[in-house]
C-alpha cells in the first residue's frame, strides 16, 4: 500500500490536514476504533482565536504569559496571526459557530484570557460539532479499528508505518507521514481524555530516538467530575467559570481567592493546585452554578445539563463535586514551526502529540484546537512545497506481541503511580520511585503496547526530574 500521505489519528489536526491536501493526492487516515472517540470530540469549551487584527497582540501576550516564559515566541505569533484565517476558512467551508440573534459570532471567556475570545458551537459541544463537520468533509480514505505500532524510519526518512488490524499486520508506505494521534491521558488514573489516547506514538518516538521536548509539562484541568466509573472523567468546561460559575467548599466559601486574587479566573494550574490543596486539607470542593438561570444553562451548556440531570444533579440548582484531573500534555515530539519533526525529512507531528512550542510550560485555555488547525495547515503547505517522492523501499515486518497476561495489572499500577507521584504537586523522592517502577516494568516480559506506555511515562518522569524548579504546570516541592 502506497499513498502520498498517511495520517495517524483522526482528531482535529489529522482531519483538518486532510481538508487542506489537494484532492488529486492519495490520503490514508488511520484511526483506532471508534473513529469519533477522540479528544477533539470531547472538547467542550471551544476554539481560541484573536477576535480581530487588534486583538492579535493581546492573544499572543496571554499565551506567552500562560506558558510561563517557556513558549517559542515565533510559534505563538504564527498561532495567533493565523487564527483568524483558519476560523474564516472553517466558516467558508460551512462550519457554524454559535452566533447571537443578530448573527454576530459569540465569544466566551476562559481562564487567563484578557478578554472573551473563545468561539463555540452547539453550546458546549464545540469539539463534537467540529469533528463531525471535518469527518463529513474529508476526502481521505479512512481505516478505523487499526493501531499504528511502528514508524518505518531509515536515514532521516519515514517510509511509512506498521499497522495492526485485529490479528492482521501490514506496512503502509507514504511520501509524507503525519502524526496527529493526540496525547497521553490513559497514563493517569484520573483524566478527561478519550479512552484510546494511550501514548503509543510518544512511546514509539522514545524507542526510535525522535526528540521529545517539554514532557514534564502535564496540565491538570481543575473542574472535573471524577466520580463516574469510566476511565474518562467528565469535564466541566472552563467556560462555565468564564460565564460566572464559582468554586466553593462544603461551607459555600469561594476559597480560591485565598490562593490567587483572580479567583476562578486564575490560570488552570493555579486553580488545580488550590483545589488539590484544599481537598488535602480535608475539604470537599464543588462547582456552583447559582449565577445561571435554568433557561440560560440549558441553552448554553446543553450537554452538561443533560449529563448531570441524568446523573441525578438538578443543575443549575445543585452544585457538582469536582476534582482536578489530567487533561493535556504540553510536551511531545519536537517540531519546527511547519510541524516537521526535528531531524526528519518527511515526518510531521501536529497537535497534542507534538511540541511546536506554542504552549511552553502551560497551555492557555482553548489554544489546543487552534493549534491543531493552524499547524496542520502549515504542515500540508510545507509538504506541498517540498513535493517529495520517496523512493519505494520495503521493510521487513517485525513480530510484535502486543499484549501479555500481566499487562493489565501493571498498567493499572502505572496509572496509579503517575497520578500520585507524577501529578499536580511533585516531590523529587516520589519521582525517583516512579522512575524506578518504570525501569522495573521495562525489564519484565511485557507486551509491546505496555512497553510503549511505560516509555512515554518514563520520558515524562525523567523530564520532571531534570526540571529542578517549579514552572507552569510542573510544580515541585519538598524532597
Ligand atoms: C475546557 O473546555 O475547559 C477545556 C478547554 C481546553 O482544554 O482548552
Image (cartoon, grey):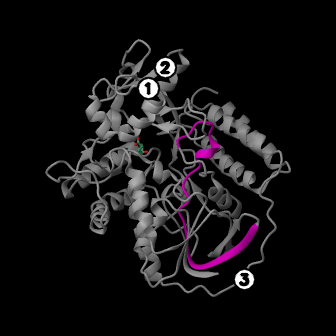
Query: What is the spatial separation of the Cα atoms under label 2 and label 1, in whole angstroms?
Result: 23 Å
- Say the numbered circle drawn on residue 313: 1
**Residue for badge 3:** 394
- The magenta-colored residue range is 168-192
Residue 433 in the image: state x and y as whole percent.
73, 35
**In the displayed structure image, the side of residue 340 where residue 300 appears, left or right:** left
Q: Where does the image place residue 472, in percent across and percent down from the top left? A: 46, 39
**Circle 1: element type:** loop
Q: Position of residue 441 (x, y in %)?
A: 79, 45
194 left or right of 64?
right
Neighbours of disc 1 within 10 Å: few (<14), some (14-19), many (20+): some
Lower position in the chain sequence, tag 3 or tag 2: 2
Residue 86 or residue 307, whichever sits in front: 307
Q: Which residue is mark 2?
A: 278
Residue closest to the eye, 321 or 200: 321
Identify the image quadrant of the N terminus. bottom right
Disc marking residue 439 = none
Q: Nearer the viewer, residue 259 or 278?
A: 278
Do callouts 3 and 2 mark residues in contact (Cβ within 8 Å)?
no
Amino acid at each position: 500500500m502506497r499513498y502520498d500521505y498517511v495520517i495517524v489519528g483522526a482528531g482535529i489536526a489529522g482531519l483538518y490536514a486532510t481538508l487542506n491536501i489537494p484532492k488529486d493526492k492519495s490520503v490514508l487516515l488511520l484511526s483506532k476504533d471508534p473513529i469519533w472517540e477522540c479528544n477533539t470530540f470531547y472538547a467542550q469549551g471551544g476554539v481560541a482565536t484573536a477576535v480581530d487584527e487588534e486583538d492579535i497582540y493581546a492573544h499572543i501576550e496571554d499565551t506567552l504569559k500562560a506558558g510561563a516564559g517557556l513558549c517559542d515566541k515565533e510559534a505563538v505569533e504564527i498561532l495567533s496571526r493565523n487564527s483568524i484565517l483558519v476560523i474564516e476558512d472553517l466558516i467558508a467551508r460551512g462550519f457554524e459557530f454559535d452566533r447571537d440573534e443578530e448573527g454576530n459570532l459569540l465569544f466566551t471567556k476562559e481562564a487567563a484570557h484578557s478578554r472573551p475570545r473563545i468561539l463555540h458551537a452547539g453550546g458546549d459541544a464545540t469539539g463534537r460539532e467540529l469533528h463531525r463537520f471535518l469527518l463529513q468533509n474529508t476526502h481521505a480514505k479512512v481505516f478505523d479499528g487499526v493501531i499504528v505500532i511502528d514508524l518505518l524510519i531509515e536515514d532521516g526518512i519515514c517510509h511509512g508505518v506498521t499497522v495492526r488490524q485485529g490479528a492482521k499486520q501490514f506496512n503502509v508506505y507514504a511520501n509524507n507521514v503525519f502524526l496527529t494521534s493526540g496525547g497521553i491521558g490513559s497514563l493517569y488514573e484520573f483524566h478527561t481524555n478519550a479512552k484510546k489516547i494511550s501514548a503509543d506514538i510518544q512511546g514509539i518516538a522514545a524507542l526510535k530516538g525522535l526528540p521529545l521536548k517539554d514532557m514534564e509539562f502535564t496540565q491538570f484541568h481543575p473542574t472535573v467530575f471524577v466520580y463516574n466509573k469510566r476511565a474518562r472523567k467528565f469535564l466541566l468546561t472552563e467556560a462555565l467559570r468564564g460565564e460566572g460559575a464559582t468554586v466553593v467548599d462544603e461551607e459555600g466559601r469561594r476559597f480560591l481567592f485565598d490562593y490567587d486574587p483572580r479567583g476562578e479566573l486564575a490560570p488552570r494550574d493555579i486553580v488545580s493546585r488550590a483545589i488539590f490543596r484544599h481537598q488535602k486539607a480535608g475539604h470537599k470542593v464543588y462547582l456552583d452554578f447559582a449565577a445561571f438561570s435554568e433557561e440560560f444553562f440549558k441553552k448554553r451548556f446543553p450537554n452538561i445539563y443533560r449529563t448531570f440531570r441524568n446523573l441525578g444533579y438538578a443543575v443549575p440548582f445543585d452544585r457538582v463535586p469536582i476534582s482536578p484531573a489530567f487533561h493535556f500534555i504540553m510536551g511531545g515530539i519536537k517540531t519546527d514551526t511547519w510541524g516537521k519533526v526535528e531531524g526528519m525529512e518527511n515526518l510531521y507531528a501536529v497537535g497534542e502529540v507534538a511540541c511546536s512550542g506554542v504552549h511552553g510550560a502551560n497551555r492557555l485555555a482553548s489554544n489546543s484546537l487552534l493549534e491543531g488547525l493552524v499547524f496542520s495547515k502549515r504542515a500540508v503547505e510545507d509538504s506541498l512545497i517540498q513535493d517529495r517522492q520517496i523512493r519505494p523501499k520495503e521493510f521487513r515486518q517485525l513480530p510484535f506481541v502486543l499484549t501479555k497476561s500481566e499487562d493489565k495489572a501493571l498498567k493499572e499500577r502505572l496509572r496509579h503511580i503517575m497520578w500520585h507521584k507524577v501529578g499536580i504537586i511533585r516531590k523529587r523522592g516520589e519521582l525517583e520511585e516512579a522512575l524506578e517502577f518504570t525501569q522495573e516494568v521495562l525489564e519484565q516480559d511485557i507486551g509491546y503496547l505496555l512497553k510503549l506506555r511505560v516509555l512515554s511515562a518514563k520520558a515524562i518522569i525523567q523530564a520532571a526530574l531534570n526540571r529542578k524548579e517549579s514552572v507552569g504546570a510542573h510544580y515541585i516541592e519538598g524532597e
